[in-house]
Amino acid sequence: MTNRDQDDPKARALARAGTLHPNPDQVADELFQANPFFDPRDGLQVKYEMLRRVRVDGHTVSRAAASCGLSRPTYYQARDERNAAFASLEQTIAYVGEVLVGICDQM
């Protein structure tokens, strides 16, 4: 964290959460340059947009990773983490559905 970031409450919060982008100055994606909503210091937001660029906008992995100041292995790690999170969510939803059906059957 730079000295400037130490004075910024958002940067401190991102650092505490472990989501402060290590190289925000390397984020060149136009979304982060043109719109103040997109904060290149927010590593989670940068990774999300990198994944979205590939999946929705059809960018290559190399292009998306480079424009976000990240590496290709970071893309694949973020993709795998996202997929694991969705799989876990789907299992939870299925379990809750089974529990609810069981409760309704007992009524």
Image (tube, helix red, strand yellow):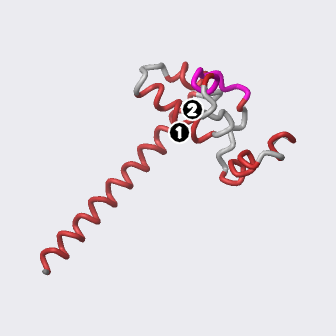
Picture coordinates of residue 84 (x, y %)?
A: 42, 48
- Residue for point 38% across, 55% down: 88
Q: Are marks 2 and 1 in contact (CB under 8 Å)?
A: yes
**Among the 4 quarters of the image, the one containing residue 73:** top right
Magenta range is 25-33
Q: CA distance from mark 2 to mark 1?
A: 6 Å
Does residue 9 appear left or right of residue 42 in this picture? right
Q: Secondary structure at mark 1?
A: helix
- Which residue matches tag 2? 73
Q: Secondary structure at mark 2?
A: helix
Picture coordinates of residue 44 (x, y %)?
A: 58, 42
Picture coordinates of residue 70 (x, y %)?
A: 63, 29
- Residue for point 66% across, 33% down: 40
Pick whichever, 33 or 75, lies toward us. 33
Is 61 covered by the magenta stretch? no
- Which residue matches tag 1? 77
Residue furthest front as drawn? 36
If the image is split into quadrants, where does the N terminus sit? top right
Q: Is residue 10 above or below residue 79?
A: below
**Among the 4 quarters of the image, the one containing residue 26:** top right
Picture coordinates of residue 104 (x, y %)?
A: 15, 74
